[in-house]
Image: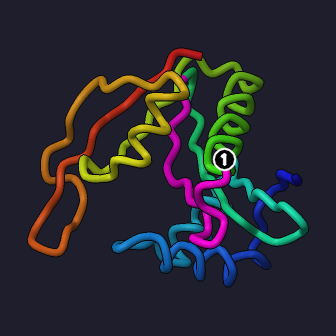
């Protein structure tokens, strides 16, 4: 299992995964902006194939997980948890005290993963995400590091 930095050369494959697993995916520009801003952008590669990625923004003492996804063909194998745990370790090494994230209120599998890794709900962002019939709430979750 390899965890490596994302580069511009990886964006075609990252976008393929992003559009396959998210109803309202990030754009190439979103990923390019994150790379240009030197946000930690990591790829998870079992067998030298990109299976998932994560993007984090580090502040003064807080990290925010902006995006995390596992390719549909690699889901339900514990890779999401491994990638999330790697991002938590990275945040700790950068002396972050807390990690925050938003998750769709309807995304039960992701919420279960976050709770299992110690995240708790600390807020609600009403109408945060676009949805097929309007907007959807986001749970704001956090974990002390």
Q: Can you name the residue that lies furthest to the left here?
A: 133
Secondary structure under the numbered disc 1 in the rendered image: loop
The magenta stretch is: 62-78
Relative placement, left or right, of 53 versus 127 is: right
Residue 32: image x %, image y %? 62, 70
The quadrant of the picture occupied by the C terminus is top right
Number of residue marks:
1
Whether residue 13 is situated above or below residue 118 in the rendered picture: below
Whether residue 61 is situated above or below residue 104 in the rendered picture: above
Residue 2: image x %, image y %? 88, 54
At x 44%, y 29%, the residue is 115
Find out whether residue 70 is within the magenta segment. Answer: yes
At x 35%, y 74%, the residue is 23
Relative placement, left or right, of 18 versus 52 is: left
Relative placement, left or right, of 52 versus 63 is: right
Quadrant of residue 57 within the rendered picture? top right
132 or 5: nearer the eye?
132
Residue 78: image x %, image y %? 66, 47
Relative placement, left or right, of 145 versus 134 is: right
At x 73%, y 28%, the residue is 89
Find out whether residue 108 is within the magenta segment. Answer: no
Whether residue 88 is situated above or below residue 98 in the rendered picture: below
For disc 1, the neighbor class at 10 Å (few under 14, some 14 to 19, many from 20) is: few
Residue at the spot of label 1: 78
């Amino acid at each position: 299992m390899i965890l490596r930095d994302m580069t511009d050369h990886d964006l075609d494959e990252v976008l393929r995964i992003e559009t396959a697993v998210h109803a309202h995916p990030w754009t190439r520009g979103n990923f390019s902006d994150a790379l240009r801003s030197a946000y930690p952008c990591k790829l998870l590669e079992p067998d030298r194939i990109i299976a998932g990625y994560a993007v984090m923004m580090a502040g003064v003492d807080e990290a925010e997980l902006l995006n995390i996804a596992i390719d549909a063909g690699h889901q339900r194998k514990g890779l999401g948890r491994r990638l999330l745990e790697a991002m938590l370790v990275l945040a700790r090494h950068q002396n972050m005290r807390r990690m925050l994230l938003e998750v769709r209120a309807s995304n039960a599998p992701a919420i279960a993963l976050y709770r299992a890794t110690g995240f708790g709900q600390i807020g609600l962002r009403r109408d945060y995400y676009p949805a097929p019939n309007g907007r959807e709430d986001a749970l704001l979750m956090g974990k002390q590091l």
